[in-house]
Image (tube, rainbow, N blue to C red):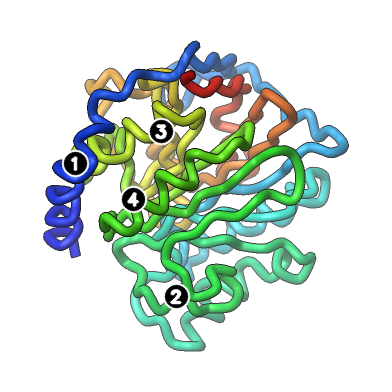
């Protein structure tokens, strides 16, 4: 699968060469955050989720569907948080189901752990990772409607969420993505599996994918990108004005997996399983990264970028 994906990227690097010279959007995003670099800051000051009426509230989850006790513990924290922070949806950044994908696997690795969310009407909107079969696009509770890449308008605020199939960045998909990023929404939020920027010792930054996607992100008003694949949590320092999140420890975890010498990391945690809670209100995006005990291990607020004119 990796060979096929890189072959597709090589084609795209020629077909979309025009994007490689695209300028960056006007004005960098700014982030006020409550934790210094490192896995366990001594005394982080938390930026709370404001929980405002009319804001968009959602969770981000990745690399999770393994059916373990640790997955269920983190899922329980998601359910508990929703009792006071009414998230309407969950976006997944891939590796949704590890191993078998029969009916019992979906029940044990997805439906049972997240029943407290599913039963409350929270919709999951999945993207696919390298451990996921494309048949998952037909699984009703992932709300993909048979599509391996797609977008949807959020129920609140001027937000479009864009699920990319990063294993197969075909010319057809990239042409579609260019159109999606040409819309007029205030927030265009891509989410997918392979991270263009990551400090992972095992996988790290997918530079080939970055060369294809980043110019399009810069030309549009993309401000944040959510990814997985590396089994830890990382928030990068803004890269050309865009903040990249790696949320790859929803069930899996690679302890000590962050290379602290890359210079990319604003905050990283490779000791806990983590999901993200996100709130968008007008020009601000608030985020909390929360571990299996309910502790907030990273938080902040990011102002949206303006489109390059």
Secondary element at image label 4: helix
Could you tell me residue 17's position as x and y percent?
19, 36
Please report the residue visible at 46 percent of the width from the left and 37 percent of the height from the top: 225
Quadrant in which the N terminus appears: bottom left
Instruction: Give the mark nearer the N terminus: 1 vs 3.
Output: 1
Please report the residue visible at 31 percent of the width from the left and 33 percent of the height from the top: 197
Please report the residue visible at 59 percent of the width from the left and 18 percent of the height from the top: 34
Please report the residue visible at 36 percent of the width from the left and 21 percent of the height from the top: 239
- Distance of mark 2 from mark 3, alpha carbons? 27 Å
**Residue that numbered label 3 is attached to:** 217
Mark 3 burial class by Cα count in 10 Å: few <14, some 14-19, many 20+ = many
Compared with 142, 23 (above or below) is above
Could you tell me residue 122's position as x and y percent?
72, 61
Between circles 2 and 4, the one closer to the viewer is: 4
- Distance of mark 4 from mark 1, alpha carbons? 14 Å
**Residue that numbered label 2 is attached to:** 136
- Distance of mark 2 from mark 1, alpha carbons? 26 Å
Name the disc covering residue 61, or none: none
Secondary element at image label 3: helix
**Residue that numbered label 1 is attached to:** 208
Name the disc covering residue 174, or none: 4
Secondary element at image label 1: helix
Q: Are marks 2 and 3 in contact (CB under 8 Å)?
A: no
Between circles 1 and 3, the one closer to the viewer is: 3
Instruction: Give the mark nearer the N terminus: 2 vs 3.
Output: 2
Between circles 4 and 3, the one closer to the viewer is: 4
């Amino acid at each position: 699968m990796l060979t096929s994906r890189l072959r597709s990227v090589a084609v795209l690097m020629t077909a979309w060469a025009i994007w490689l010279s695209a300028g960056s959007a006007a004005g960098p995003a700014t982030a006020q955050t409550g934790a210094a670099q490192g896995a366990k800051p001594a005394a982080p000051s938390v930026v709370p989720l404001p929980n405002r009426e009319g804001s968009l509230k959602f969770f981000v989850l990745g690399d999770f569907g393994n059916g373990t006790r640790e997955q269920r513990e983190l899922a329980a924290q998601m359910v508990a948080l929703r009792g006071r922070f009414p998230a309407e949806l969950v976006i997944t950044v891939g590796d949704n189901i590890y191993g078998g994908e029969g009916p019992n696997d979906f029940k044990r690795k997805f439906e049972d752990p997240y029943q407290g969310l599913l039963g409350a009407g929270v919709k999951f909107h999945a993207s696919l990772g390298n451990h996921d079969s494309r048949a998952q696009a037909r699984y009703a509770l992932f709300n993909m409607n048979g599509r391996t890449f797609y977008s949807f308008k959020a129920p609140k605020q001027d937000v479009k969420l864009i699920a990319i199939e990063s294993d197969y960045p075909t010319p057809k998909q990239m042409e579609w993505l260019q159109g999606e990023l040409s819309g007029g929404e205030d927030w265009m939020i891509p989410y997918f599996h392979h991270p263009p920027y990551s400090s992972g010792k095992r996988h790290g930054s997918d530079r080939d994918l970055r060369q294809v996607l980043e110019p399009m992100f810069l030309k549009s008003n993309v401000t944040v990108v959510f990814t997985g694949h590396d089994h830890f949590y990382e928030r990068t320092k803004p890269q050309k004005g865009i903040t990249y999140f790696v949320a790859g420890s929803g069930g899996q975890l690679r302890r000590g997996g962050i290379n602290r010498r890359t210079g990319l990391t604003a905050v990283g945690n490779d000791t806990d399983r983590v999901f993200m809670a996100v709130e968008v209100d007008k020009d601000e995006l608030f985020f909390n990264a929360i571990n299996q005990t309910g502790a907030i291990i990273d938080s902040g607020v990011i102002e949206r970028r303006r489109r390059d004119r």
